[in-house]
Image (cartoon, grey):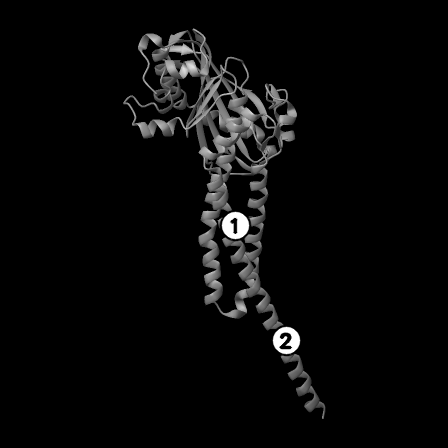
Amino acid sequence: MTTPAPDAAPTVRRASVEVLRIFDAAYGIDLAGVERVLRGRAPVARIRLQRVEPKALAFDDPPVVTDLASPELHVGGRRVETLASARIYSFGVVSLSLEVMLPEAMEWAGFEDFAREAEREAEALPFWQSALDSLLGALRPALDQPTPLRMEEDYVLVTVRELDPPLSAAGLTEAVDLVPLLTHETRPLSDAARRDVLRYVHSYYRDDLVVLTWDRAFVLEPGDDGDVAEVLEVANAQLLELRYYDALLDDELPRAYAVAAAVRRGPKLTRRRYARAANDMRALVSEVTLISEKVDNALKVTEDVYLARVYASALELFRFRFWTLSIDRRLSLIRETYAALYDEAVATRAEWLEIAIVALILFEVVMAFVRA
C-alpha cells in the first residue's frame, strides 16, 4: 500500500477509543444472581447484538451488562467524555470497558495522535482497580470460588463512525495508512511486518471495515451498533479463561509428578493415602473439562457470515487452538497420573486383603491345634 498524500486524508467527525480490561474473577458466576444484586443500583441487561437475527448468533448464557460511574479523563490537555460499563460472564470473567469519545472533528493525523493518547491516559487511570473491587464486592453472593490472584487481558478498539468526506472501506485504505494507528509505530514498517499487521481484514458492506491485530482493532462502522466490539470482547474473554486454566494445570503437573514419585519411593503399606490425591486430581480434571466446554460454547455464530469471519479470525489470531490443545495435553497427563495412583491404591488394598486372608487362615490353623 502506498502512503497517501496528506491532503487526501479525510476528517474524522465521530469516533471513539474503547479500552477493555478483562479479568478472571471466579470459577463461575450466577448471572441470575448478578441481575438480582445489581437491579435497582444500576441499569442491567443481557447482551443482545443489534444487526443480526437471534438465530444467527447465540450466546450460551448471554453476559450481563451494567453501567459504571464514568471517570474523568483528560486527553491533550482537555477533558473528554467517557462511557464506562461492565460485562459479567457466567464462566467467571468480568470485563470492564472505558470508551473515550472524540471531542471534536479532527483531521486524520490529529485523530491518530488522539487515539494513542486516549489509550495511554485511559490505561493509566486508577478507575480499573477501584471499579473492579467495587463491582466484585457487590457481586460476592453470585461468585462461585472467587479467584485470589486475577489474571487479565486487555484490548483496544478504535471505532470510526463518520468521515468527511464519506469514504468506502476501499477508499479509506487508499486515503490513509492504518498501520501506525494499529501499531503505535512512528517509523515505517517493513513490507513483511505490514503484511502481518494487515493480515486479518474484513468488510461486508462497501462502507464497513474491521482490521484485527493482537492487541488492537480498527472498526469503520457508519451505524451505531457495536456487534463487532461485542464479538471481539467475547473472544478475549475466552482467551483469558484458556490462559488461566492452562497456567493452573501447568502449576498442578509438578505436584502430580511429585505425588507419583513419592508413591514409587514410599513403602507399599502407606500408599493408600494417595487415593485421596487421585480423587483431588480427578476433581480438578472434571472442573477444567467442564469450564473449558463452557468457554468453547460461550458464543456460536451460525448464519451471520461477516461476524462469523471476524470471530473466527479473532480466535485464530489469539491462538485459541494452541491454548485448547495445551490444556488437553495437560489434562491427559494428569489423567494418566491419577489413573496410576488409583492402580497403586487398588493394588495396596488387594495386598492388604491377601494379608488378612492369610492371617485368618493361620489363625484358624493355630486355633485348631490349640483345641486339639
Percent coordinates x, y for residue 123 in the rendering: 40, 23
In this image, 56 relative to 172: left or right? right
Dot 1 alpha-carbon crowd within 10 angstroms: few under 14, some 14 to 19, many 20 or more = many
Percent coordinates x, y for residue 3 in the rendering: 32, 17
Q: Which residue is mark 1?
A: 331
**Residue 77 in which image quadrant:** top left
- Observer-nearest of 25 and 229: 229
Q: Residue at x 57, y 64 (%)?
A: 343
Q: Residue at x 45, y 33 (%)?
A: 317
Circle on res. 270: none
Which comes sooner in the sequence, label 2 or label 1? 1
Q: Is residue 275 visible?
A: yes
Q: Is residue 73 visible?
A: no
Under mark 2, the amino acid is Ala
Percent coordinates x, y for residue 141 in the rendering: 61, 33
- Observer-nearest of 195 and 352: 195
Q: Quadrant of the N terminus?
A: top left
Which residue reaches farthest right?
371
In this image, 167 relative to 360: left or right? left
Q: Which residue is mark 2?
A: 356
**Residue 160 in which image quadrant:** top left
Secondary structure of residue under mark 1: helix
In this image, 22 relative to 138: left or right? left
Under mark 1, the amino acid is Leu
Discs 2/1, front: 1
In space, the residues marked 2 and 1 are separated at their CA atoms by 37 Å
Percent coordinates x, y for residue 200 in the rendering: 44, 28
User: Against 248, is 35 above or below?
Assistant: above
User: Against 348, is 44 above or below?
Assistant: above
Secondary structure of residue under mark 2: helix
